[in-house]
Image (cartoon, helix red, strand yellow):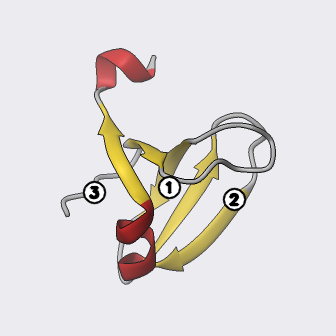
Amino acid sequence: MDLQLHDVLELKKQHPCGSKRWEVLRVGMDIKLKCLSCGHEFMEPRRKVEKTIKRIVPKEEAE
């Protein structure tokens, strides 16, 4: 999967704050994500994140 910095992702599972949208802050072996609702940040291995992605939100829709 081709993830770029500042892509907005919609994950399959909802965060406890109610949002499903996350911004990519770091890409590599690990991916750092930031919740667009509450600002919570975390890092996970790329393989685990790619399994939880529902879709990459287009730039027009993300704004």
How far from the left and from the top, in percent, is residue 44? 54, 77
Residue furthest to the left: 2
Binning the other alpha carbons within 10 Å of mark 2 as few (below 14), some (14 to 19) or many (20 upward) gives some
Q: Amino acid at mark 3?
A: Leu
**In terms of image quadrants, where is residue 53?**
bottom left
Q: Amino acid at mark 1?
A: Leu
Q: Is residue 53 above or below residue 8?
A: below
What's the distance in space between the residues labelled 2 and 3, CA to CA? Answer: 17 Å
| Label 1 with label 2: CB-CB less than 8 Å | yes
Name the residue carrying label 1. Answer: 25
Query: Which of 15 and 63 lies nearest the eye of the viewer?
Result: 15
Quadrant where the image shows the C terminus: top left
Binning the other alpha carbons within 10 Å of mark 3 as few (below 14), some (14 to 19) or many (20 upward) gives some
> In what element is the residue under mark 1?
strand
Q: Is residue 21 left or right of residue 42?
A: left
Badge 2 or badge 3: first in the primary sequence: 3
> In what element is the residue under mark 3?
loop
On residue 41, which mark appears?
A: 2
